[in-house]
Amino acid sequence: SSFPDILEEAVLSYGGGRGYSELEDAISTLRKMVEKRRRDLEELEVKGKGMLEKKASLSKSLGQVHGEIDALIKFVRRYSETYDDNLKKLSAYRAKASRVEEYLRRLQEKADALTRKREALTKIVQSDEQNREEQNLLTLNSELATLNGEHQMVIDELNEVNLQLAQMKTKLENDLLVSYNNTKKSIEKLMLEHESNRRKVEELKGALAECQSRYDSLKSKEEEFRRASLNMQKTISEYDLKINEKLAQVNSLNELISKSTVRVNQISSKIEGLKEKLQTEYNTLRMYGYESPIEYVEGCETVLSFMVDEMAELKTVLNYLAEKDYENVFESYKNLSLRSNQLEEEKNSIVDLIEQIEEKKRSVFMEAFEKIDRNLRAVFRELTDGDAWLEIEKPDDIFSGGIYLMVRFPNKKPKESLMLSGGEKTITTVAFILAMQSAFRSPFYLLDEVDAHLDAINLERLINILYQRSKESQIVLITLKDVALSKADKIFGVYLREGHANVVEYSPGIKIKEVQA
């Protein structure tokens, strides 16, 4: 049944006079429901934390995918720039080839001109008369030889240039073809990876949206359960108050019944005594010859009362020790009065001393509290970039309540230290110990695997802080983490061999030696 139905049944049972057992059963049922809702709330918190962790993991994966996409884009841009550079080089080579071809064309024209000139000279030599002077013939022959040499040089240079041009063209075509093929394959591969990453990003976005929706739903249910739990707690408190009032009334009635029972027993006992006394009187009368009670004489009680009063008055008149008793009483009164004044002064002195002690105690407590709170804020911020502080449960009467340790990690809501996870409790406890160390120094500290549940970032921060604090106090740390060992001044390793504990001592730069434990 639902909470309103159980509440209505409890009220009707209480109002109908069916007793306290039904009300207690209803309260017990309400408490069970509150406990169940509390467990449901804890399960929702665990699920919410899991969803947050999954969301963080998906966000991290999404960031990695975006990083890969950015790297691929840069890679494509770099290959595009390389391709553009190759195109520019190809254009330059083509321009150079054009210039070489122009140069070859001019050389060819020059060679053709020399050939025509040589042929003309040859014709002139052949057509000249035989009787031309020998000197002219030698001159022409010399000029012809020179032209032949120049012609051969031009041909050789032309052949060499053609060979270089062919080699350059072949090399350029091969290089451009290889570069083009590699660039094309890389671009195709990048496009496939980009498409795969795009689909992966879409899937991650869908999963992230689903996680966010489920987280919002769980958060709404958590708030609903929290409100229902608060209402239940309030209702239970009201019924607890009513039950306590009724129980007080029952106890009062039971006490009255007990007193009445005792009084009845006393009266019954007194009646029995009077009956026995009356029987004794009857027996006495029979001894004197009266078989039945004598007749009642009117006014005998008045006479008897008058005689009793007169006897008491005579006793008062005949009290000769009254004056002495008065002196003794007066002297005792004086002594008691003096003693009362002394006790009053002593009481005032004690009250003043207590007030001074309370004031001093409060001053010392607040000084230590503020000092530890200030150090806790600084140490926790240095460890996690979050906030931690101390709160007094009852500020108006600080010694009648406790102290809350409040913690707010980055991007999270403030929580009391009892509501934290294992790793969060570890780092909070270490921060509190370091804060107390700053306020009240100790010669050494022994920490047993406090870094077991910390991630790499928080572990490195913690080890750096412990390393700084080790300059003021000796710190002994039991750990399995390499980061912690890298900062240690001295390292001892412990292991078992043949049932005996063995200790290995190690210091940087010193040979390892074994120490039998």
Image (cartoon, grey):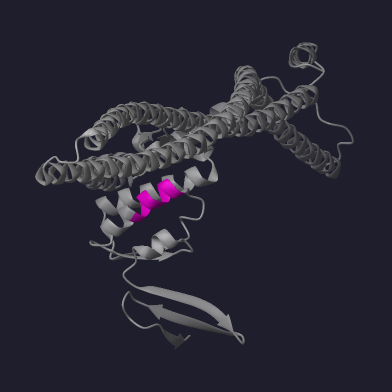
Q: Is residue 468 above or below residue 337?
A: below
Find residue 243 and report its horizontal and vertical position in percent. 67, 23
The location of residue 391, given as percent across then percent down, is 37, 34
Position above or below: 477 against 84: below
Q: Using residue 388 as the reference point, say whether residue 330 is left or right of it.
A: left
Outermost residue toward the front in this view: 131
Q: Image quarter for residue 407? A: top left
* Residue 384 visible to the viewer: yes
Q: Residue at x 46, y 61 (%)?
A: 481
Q: Main secondary structure of the magenta part?
A: helix
Residue 80 is inside the magenta segment: no
Foreground residue, 424 or 511?
Answer: 511
Quadrant of the snapshot with the N terminus: top right
**Residue 82 placement, left or right of 66:** left
Q: Dividing the picture into quarters, in which one does residue 463 lie? A: bottom left
User: Residue 284, position in %: x, y?
Assistant: 81, 43
Numbered label tally? 0
| Residue 347 appears in the figure | no
Instruction: Describe residue 310's horizontal placement relative to residue 511 as left or right.
Output: right
Question: Which portion, as a residue range, is magenta?
Answer: 456-463
Which one is in front, 332 or 301? 332
Residues 282 and 388: in front is 388
Compared across the picture, whether 120 is left or right of 514 comes to left
Q: Quadrant of residue 133?
A: top left
Residue drawn at x 63%, y 28% as measured from the top left:
196
Q: Where is residue 356 in the image (x, y as percent from the top left)?
A: 20, 42
